[in-house]
Image (cartoon, rainbow, N blue to C red):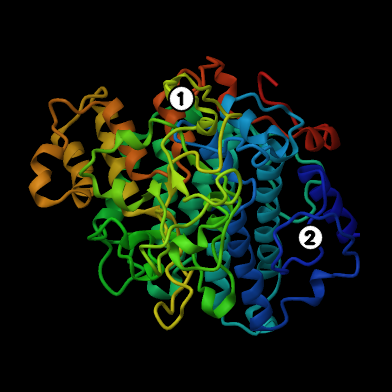
Amino acid sequence: MKQKLFKRIIRNILGLLLPAAFFDGCTKLNETDYHDYLAANYYNNSNEVVSAVLRPYTHTNAWITSSGQVGYWRVSELSADQLAWPVKYQDGQDNGDWIRLHYHTWQVNDPDIVGNPWNLMYTGVGYCNDPLTALNSRTAEQMGITESDRQQYIAELHLLRAFYYLKLMDLYGNIPIVTQVATPASPPTVPRDSVFRFVESEILAWKDKVPVLSPALIGRMSKAGAFAMLVELYLNAEKWTGTARWQECIANCDSLINGTAGSQAQLPMALDSTIDATYSNTNENSTEIIFSIAYDYQKSTFRVNFNSDFYHFNERYIYDGTQGGNNGIVLIPGVFTRFRDNDLRKKSWFLVGPMWYATDPTKPVMGFREYAGQQLVFVDNIRRNKNLQPGQDPNTLPSDMTQGEENSGVRFNKYKPGSSNLSIDPHYFSNDWAVYRLSWIYFAKAEALMRMNGGVATQQAVDLVNAVKKRAFAPADWAAAQSQVGTFTLDSLLDERGREFIFEGWRRQDQIRFGTFTSGTWWDHLPSNDKNKELFPIPYTTITNNKNLKQNPGY
């Protein structure tokens, strides 16, 4: 009976079934009958328990990172003002998904844009609820673990589930809350402010029952991760509930800045000393990362799949690796020029201009499509330069989401996988994906200070921004590059956030909080001035299957 109810609740939330086995490595949601699988036959030894506890973490990879799937990360970045996936002749059509994201014209029945993030995240909620039920209904002795472990597992799963609901609330606002397998079968919509209170109460109830961050907890929820979630919650509280919580935001920032929540490295939590340490393939040594999706590609063949979203077909030659990509996501024209020429991030985090073999800097990387037989040259524009006539001004060429070429756009290089020659680099593609990092906490505190001061910069706020920004400039350039309290505004802060956190999945949320998501103009995107677009709709299949759900306004 429990299995039938379990199937029904998943169908009513997702519009389809969970994968066959909870602990399978696959994150694609294929409809499968799993009636022979009984949870009662699991959780009988420590290995089974640990695999169940860790399963929702591996699933988180599918939606919070640039994973190659349409999850939270992709819709958060491609609907905002920095990144786009333009059509490049035969490539990037993809049912018009990326075009609709860019122009904010998605529909209720969009299965990828609207449905897939919902499905991925609610599947993860199920991956949290099932072990929570087992851990709460069995003794530690029955499961072959210690009572201390049982309590810690329960606490971290509560926190991870709160993270799922936080991000669901961000995208969809008014959502169902389910905390037990199969109960209720058709969960009702819960208003966003109530979801907020639920997430807050879960974090506050469980944050002191998990350990502080340590090397043993890389990629798992810790007290540091709980503080970071509270920072995100309170930073957006005014938008999400109508009530500002700036002081609570600052207090939780201080719990991380002051080093009371541990560190994933052997040193105290602190800003990394360089702009690249946070993203390297040895970034388990980063003193800055608070919560990450952790990978060790050489031991598990499990890695972040950002190459699928970003890499050109022949990009493996550029970095001496094994992986190309779908030649997809690029910078929107104009974003690259927002970085000063002497900004080290501009040189390190992007690829632009002629491309060369990593193993031979005199050998050009060649194009694959319309530039086959010619050197691949990434350009800071999206237009059909092949069509340029003699004497024609290139700026007169059409430039929009349908007019790309294989070399269009400045490219991603923030995370560098290293060389696949393991004698040179034994850590190839073992980069952890940073979800929360200390720089983001510095910026959150700076913003809270400014908003408490009527949007006017304080010296403390500007000092926090400069502490992060200083790493991006040579000492000789810093005096002219640093932000000044007399000229630093909320618009300046949004611009600085865009530079520092580009590619990291924050831009949609930032634009909504700063009021530019539906009112701003970027490249060929014109404002909709439709505040309803600040939320995605409840997916059509889901709301059709569950009559207790209420659609978001405007859909």
> What is the quadrant of the N terminus in the image?
bottom right
Residue 426 image label: none
Which residue lies most toward the top here? 529
Name the side, left or right, on which 545 lies relative to 358: right
Amino acid at the residue labelled 1: Pro
Q: Looking at the image, which residue is at 86% across and 49% down? A: 8
Q: CA distance from mark 2 to mark 1?
A: 57 Å
- Which residue is under mark 1? 390
Q: What is the quadrant of residue 47 in the picture?
A: bottom right
Q: What is the quadrant of residue 90 in the picture?
A: top right
Residue 315, image x and y in percent?
51, 58
Residue 256, image x and y in percent?
30, 55
Residue 150, image x and y in percent?
58, 74
Between discs 2 and 1, the one toward the N terminus: 2
Q: Looking at the image, which residue is at 43% across and 27% down? A: 243
Residue 437, image x and y in percent?
36, 54
- Which residue is under mark 2? 19
Disc 1 is placed on an element classified as loop
